[in-house]
Image (cartoon, rainbow, N blue to C red):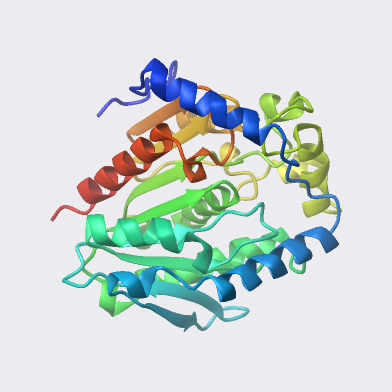
Amino acid sequence: MTDFTGSNPAPWPQGERELAQVREFNKKLAWLPRFRIRNRTTPRLIQALLRASQLVSPSPLPKHGLSAERKMIEGGAVPVAVRIIRPKGKAKGVVLDFHGGGWVIGNAQMNDNFNLAIVDSCEVVVVSIDYRLAVSTPIEGLLEDCLHATRGLLRDPAFADLPVVVVGESAGAHLAAATLLALQTSPELLQRISGALLYYGLYDLTGTPSVRTAPAETLLLDGPGIVPALRLLTPGLSDQERRQPPLSPLYGNFSGFPPALLFAGELDPLRDDTLEIAKRWAVSAPVEMHMLPSCPHGFIHFPTAIAQSVLAYSRQWISARCLP
């Protein structure tokens, strides 16, 4: 394992063939519309299409002899739903999944393919949090949902003797990091977390330098629209208020945090978020951070050898955190 030293991310092994494949796929991405958050109507439409597609294309779990259980975590301001996928044999740990979607789209089912691979490969239970979305709930409400669900699961006697790894992607990485910060008020629960695996998160809601200078040709994300979107998601707050942790996890105190594995793409406008949080996190715990060459935001979803190697390595890392 190569630790992040605070100066340079660890190199990722790849050859010219793998890089050429990524660059060829990027040409296709360049023709697609960028994801924008300019209002609350478009995300609602995208969310409706997501749910419709999940009805038309059922979950892959039954084909692998697995099923998903929906459970409500009660006792908070509102009940929070979680989606639980259990391995066929005895579980070696628990993965707590925070899905992405820019805080405005997505649900716990959308990661079934990734979570299925984790369950099979790592022999763990995967619990995905179905937090409310920011189209109808202030972003602080999303943080409350994630914290409440995490506390409930960490206190669940069924998982009492199992190590827990948190996994988050994009907006989910932000929510995972914010949840860890909020858990510092319950150190006995924070100590239950054995690792954090975060993909290309956004950790400063005012925008890091790479976000503020993102050009229009940024792949997948609308570069110039990111900062206005963050302001739309946090109405009535000043930049100083937006920088307060845990809303902006980058500015938190990482004492007591678990080891972390962080990934970002070289072409992702959010890359500085991962670089900066890796430096701050590494003061308190081991951090392994990789910047993937020629990769844009969302790269683990794309049909490239680099994406597959990152996911395979991630599963190995999860398994290592769940050793007895």
Q: Where is 305 relative to 36, above or below?
A: above
- Percent position of residue 306, x then y: 40, 32
> x, y percentage for residue 99?
53, 58
Q: Residue at x 78, y 46 (%)?
A: 36
Percent position (x, y) of residue 65?
28, 75
User: From this viewpoint, is residue 234 visible?
Assistant: no
Q: Position of residue 116 (x, y in %)?
A: 35, 62
Quadrant assignment, res 262: top left
State whether residue 258 is above or below residue 288: below
Task: Compare residues 196 and 183 and report the one nearer the observer.
Answer: 196
Quadrant of the rendering where the C terminus is positioned: bottom left
Residue found at x 41% / y 24%: 18
For image coordinates 55% across by 51% down, the residue present is 178
Name the residue: 48% across, 71% down: 149
Tell me: residue 220, above or below residue 58.
above
Q: Would you say residue 19 is visible in this rendering?
A: yes
Image position of 191 (left or right of 235): left
Q: Nearest the camera: 54 or 316?
A: 54
